[in-house]
Image: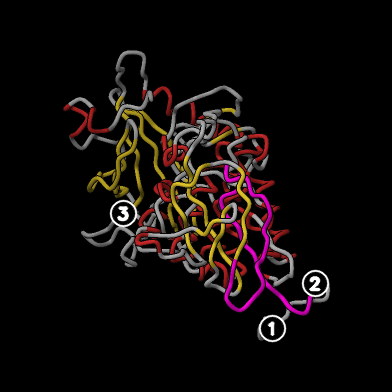
Amino acid sequence: MDHTPADALPPSANAAPDIPDFELVREIGRGGFGRVWLARNRATGQLRAVKVIPRFRTGTADPAGREIVSITRLELNLRRQHPNLLGIHHVGQTPDHLFYVMDLADDAGGREGGQTPGYQPATLQHRVAGGPVAAGRCLVCARQLLSGLASLHEAGMVHRDVKPANCLFVDGTLRLADFGLLTEASPQVSRLGTEKYMPPDGRMDARADVYAAGLVIYEMVTGFPIECFPQLGQRADAIAADPTLSALLRLALDACQPDPGERFRDAGEMLAALEKQLCEGSPVFRLRRRAVVGLAGMAIVAAAAAIGYWWMVPPRVHVNFVTYPFDATILLDGRALSGPGGTPLKTPCTVEDLPAWTHHVTFRHPAWPDLDAGPVDFARTRQVVASWEYPPAEPDEEQPLPAPVP
């Protein structure tokens, strides 16, 4: 990865630089080639965030040159400032530095931004570190992220570094930030960005941004780091019970397909799919007699950083199993899955280290006849959801689960 860390900057770059019209109060962030400072306008006293990039070269790397090209692309291609992209108010340079002045994020501690010594920028990374995001807020953040990203894709650009740390909150609104790797959409393979948010194919086009956005939404829904993707663990019950979380999870799973051709084309298409799904309702949680497989048929794969490249033969994968009602035993190819000590595993649960080939899945519940989910290819489907219902429901009619037949 051609991405020099800020810690590797020359000693002269670590001191607070002299920036025209701004007093740099203290450093509040680092990323890639530069540092972000809490800064006060000497004339107005207004607080802003100022990113400063040293003008030096390391081998073939030209950090300031790359940054100015990206910002220039942003200004030339966006006709107006988007409410879900971090606002850039001024770009300037000194003999030693490139700098640009940005909106200041809210305070992560909930205080008035920048006014206290303990100020830290409010980012989505800080928010998900505290656990899963509430369903309503999760939906708002997902819409805002995809809206900002869609504006870049519509202009023919890709971000290449979508992740929670680059999602800032300004006046409570999520804004996508850090445009240092912004470029024109291209099918070429690139390893620039944050490795664990990159798709396994390495093509950093709009579909790569979609892949990363899917992982970000997964983190919000589950509260788990992406190394756990696609596990649900103890969150399976809460997600199953909430149509909004269910819709967001399905969106994330579809965005993270291993084959780029099977992902959403861009963030605009991903956002439209979310709105359509919310309008139609999530079919997974309407009880039907037949099994619903793969979270209403959605095929997913684990993140490359967690399990290796998807084409490895044979990979070992994590698979989620959910039934309604719960507490069903899982049979693969006629044999019950068991945990430590030989205790049968019960739904809902995540089963680790399963071979990624096709298995015949059956669910066995003490109060119901066996429910056949059919053959499921774990190389493509990482969640199996099934339900019992007697008598069958009328089309588009949601009914409570009646008492089981003796």
Label of residue 277 in the image: none
Q: Which residue, given by chain and number where applicable, does mark 3 sit on?
A: 45
Amino acid at pointer 1: Val
Q: Residue furthest right?
A: 395
Range shown magenta: 364-392
Q: Give the x, y percent position of residue 91.
A: 42, 35
> Between residues 284 and 199, which one lies in front from this camera angle?
284
The first of marks 1 and 3 along the sequence is 3
Considering the image in quadrants, where does the C terminus appear? bottom right
Q: Taking 315 as reference, is 246 left or right?
A: right
Q: Is residue 93 above or below residue 344?
A: above
Which of the two residues, 289 or 203, is positioned nearer the viewer here?
A: 289
Residue 202 seen anywhere in this rendered image of the structure: yes
Question: How far is the residue under mark 1 from the one under mark 3?
Answer: 73 Å
At label 2, counting other C-alpha atoms closer than 10 Å, the crowd grade (few under 14, some 14-19, many 20 or more) is: few
Mark 3 or 2: the one toward you: 2
Q: Earlier in the sequence, mark 3 or mark 2?
A: 3
Residue at screen point 58% across, 41% down:
357
Magenta stretch: includes residue 1: no
Q: Amino acid at mark 3?
A: Gly
Its colouring scheme is secondary structure
Is 48 placed left or right of 160 in the picture? Answer: left
Q: Residue at x 35, y 62 (%)?
A: 341
Residue named by callout 1: 405
Name the residue at 29% across, 20% down: 56
**Residue 235 x/y as whole percent:** 46, 65
Residue with the mark numbered 2: 396
Given contact means CB atoms under 8 Å apart, are the residues at marks 1 and 3 in contact? Answer: no
Q: Where 49 falls versus 194 (above or below)?
A: below
Q: For residue 373: magenta? A: yes
Please, what is the three-letter code of the amino acid marked with disc 2? Asp
**Mark closer to the chain start, 2 or 1:** 2
